[in-house]
Amino acid sequence: MKFTVEGHEEAFAATGGRPFDGGKTTILMLHGAGMDHTVWSMQARYFAHHGFSVLAVDLPGHSRSAGTVPETISAFADWCLAALDAAGAGEVVVMGHSMGALIALEVASRLGARAKALALLGSVPEMKVHPDLLNAARTGKHVALETMVGWSVGKRAQIGGHRAPGAWVSGASMRLLEAGDYAVLATDLAACDTYDGALTAAAAVTCPALVLSGSDDKMTPAKLARPLVDALPDARAVILPRAGHMMMIEQPDEVLDVLADFFGALR
């Protein structure tokens, strides 16, 4: 659906094939750097048809959402809070992947009692970006996309292994990044690189939290997520075997099982 966020241009959010209803608990789904709402396709449709309303947003300046790309994680969170109000959301479950997980953490820390749960996928408290990758994105070099796909897709998914015959996770991830803009990707990566407020935000979260990691994630290794788990007052840590950073695409059923179990008590 399209809607206007106060002080910003028109925004887009996928609602999982059902009309948005702010009277239900809303799941806000936040994508990672250079990505868009399509990374949540399966999860959005499932939860929209199982008791929740869904806002799988395109962040500002990404895909179908207009506007300038925010330069900091805090500014992304400001936009998300305004988007929730513009859409008419009440109680909220906040879910994010990679960069989106950092934004989700900030959003949940500010929502107070409106936040019913928080799910962080592929997240660590510090997402430092190698200077060479930042420079490649800023100068529009395709090696930036190749590096991201190589590091974000688990080994099993790179050589096949997907439940859907013919599905190619590496190729699909590359096409999604290529459909975007290098300047957008560079801004996203810089926002991740400079963000240092994760542990402070985590300590302020008052709702139950899930930290979901992939055992084969080279971009945000599961072992580095431990300080984040410890900082959250009420957190559950789950590691998916043989999953890489793009876990919700590599292992959509397994990710959905974990999320459905975690969110089940909220309906």
Image (cartoon, rainbow, N blue to C red):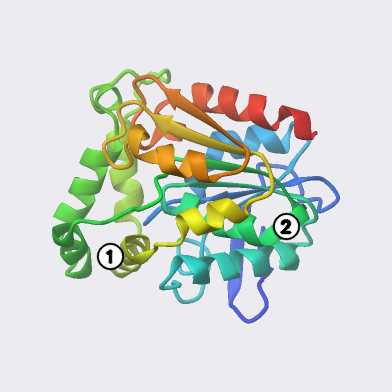
Q: Which mark is residue 182?
A: 1
The residue pinned by badge 2 equals 112
Image height check: is 219 above or below 63? Answer: above
Residue 18 at x, y percent in the picture: 74, 43
Q: Amino acid at mark 1?
A: Tyr
- In the image: residue 230, left or right of residue 22: left
Q: Which mark is residue 243?
A: none
Residue 105 appears in the picture as rendered = no
Q: Which image quarter: residue 260?
A: top right
Please name the residue shown 60% across and 72% down the image: 10
Camera-side residue: 213 or 177? 213
Residue 257 at x, y percent in the picture: 58, 22
Categorize mark 2 by other alpha carbons within 10 Å: few (<14), some (14-19), many (20+).
Answer: few
Categorize mark 1 by other alpha carbons within 10 Å: few (<14), some (14-19), many (20+).
Answer: many
Please name the residue shown 35% across and 53% down the image: 126
Residue 212 at x, y percent in the picture: 48, 33
Image height check: is 266 above or below 161? Answer: below
Camera-side residue: 152 or 218? 218
Q: Nearer the viewer, mark 1 or mark 2?
A: 2
Residue 101 appears in the picture as rendered = yes
Q: Amino acid at mark 2?
A: Gly
